[in-house]
Image: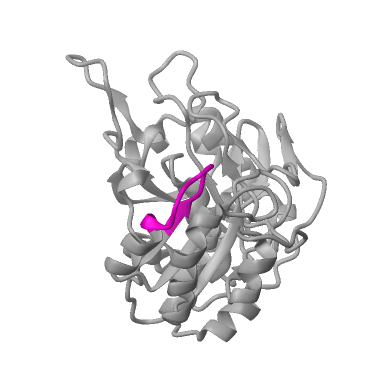
Amino acid sequence: MERKEKKTLLITTGGTIASKKDEGTGKIQSGAISGYNLASLIPNCQDFSYQVLDLLQVPSGHLTMLHLKEIAKTIKDAFQEGHYHGVVLTHGTDTLEETAYYLDLVLNDCAPVILTGSQLPPEETASDALKNLTDSFKVVLSEESKNKGVIVVFNGKIYAGSEVIKVHTSNLDAFAAPGWGPIGYIDENEVIYKRIVSKSIKMALGNSYKEPKVYMISFALDMDGCLVEGALEAGAEGLILEGFGRGQIPPKAIEAVEVAVNKGIPIVLTTRCYEGAVKGVYDYKGSAAQLEKMGVIMGKDLPKQKARIKLILALADSMSVKEIRELF
């Protein structure tokens, strides 16, 4: 059969999708199930030709940038071997969106790379684990999934890795792409795409890796610049600021931001709104227009956690502030 000829590499990293409850405490143990055991739970798993790589067994909140590079290199090496049609990567949901965005930036191969996870352990009666995993195999095997960039499959929907974020802590419909929506969905055995996401930015993965210190600071009403000052004292090499609306921050924080800019580190401005972009449309102290004039980089519509991934990759590639400004 055609499906048998298309071998998929299933890479597991832990998370709720590979978890089970402790009988004594009733609490969930993330990554307690091996990749091989997880794969064996897939209904009709004999219909798929796949190989399992049990890479990690950790909660996704424990992942580091070094882990992300290891995952990316593993996928690159797998495709270079030429044995695999695509990759399905199981992952904890807490930081799944950051890994998806990272991989979307650094992977150039046109073969499908699918990320998925679950909100409930596989053993739960109403678990979404096996449904999400089975859907992911359907998507990775679809010819339509080529050249789509990195994809996230969750709750019957297909999202672009560059757009998806987690929007609910516990609901099975945990992911969305505010302002964009899914790029497709799964209808029983049919994989349907509704739109294509253009991929114009690629970042270097590199042979060596340093971990630049990039901190995120979220502003709320009447905050001052003490967190910016603290980040500088901690050796920040870059900052992500999350402002209000179009990108405003409280006026009491301006002086600290100006000090940071004058130190020559890249500072990227984002918004706490789910939809829309930062833009200098207001003219007052603390406005995005003032910050941009000061030298702060406009992060457009990227949420802060994805802007941080992008900035870390740029700094790891030794980009100048001018180059980073152009990148964003």
The magenta stretch spans residue 214: no
Drawn side of residue 35 relative to residue 194, left or right: left
> Which of the 4 quarters of the picture holds residue 206?
bottom left
Residue name at image x 65 percent, y 68 percent: 290
The magenta stretch spans residue 223: yes
* Whether residue 286 is visible: yes
Residue name at image x 64 percent, y 56 percent: 247
Which color scheme did the rendering employ for the protein?
A: one colour
Q: Residue furthest right?
A: 194
* Whether residue 87 is visible: no
Q: Is residue 322 above or below residue 131?
A: below
Q: Is residue 64 above or below residue 88?
A: below
Residue name at image x 33 percent, y 30 percent: 19
Q: Is residue 20 above or below residue 290?
A: above
> Which of the 4 quarters of the picture holds residue 85?
bottom right
Number of disc labels: 0
Q: Nearer the viewer, residue 76 or 229?
A: 229
**What are the residue bounds of the magenta stretch?**
216-227
Image spot of residue 5 (x, y percent): 58, 54
Image spot of residue 40 (x, y percent): 39, 33
Image spot of residue 21 (x, y percent): 28, 21
Q: Nearer the viewer, residue 26 or 77?
A: 26
Q: Residue furthest left?
A: 24
Q: Nearer the viewer, residue 237 or 5?
A: 237
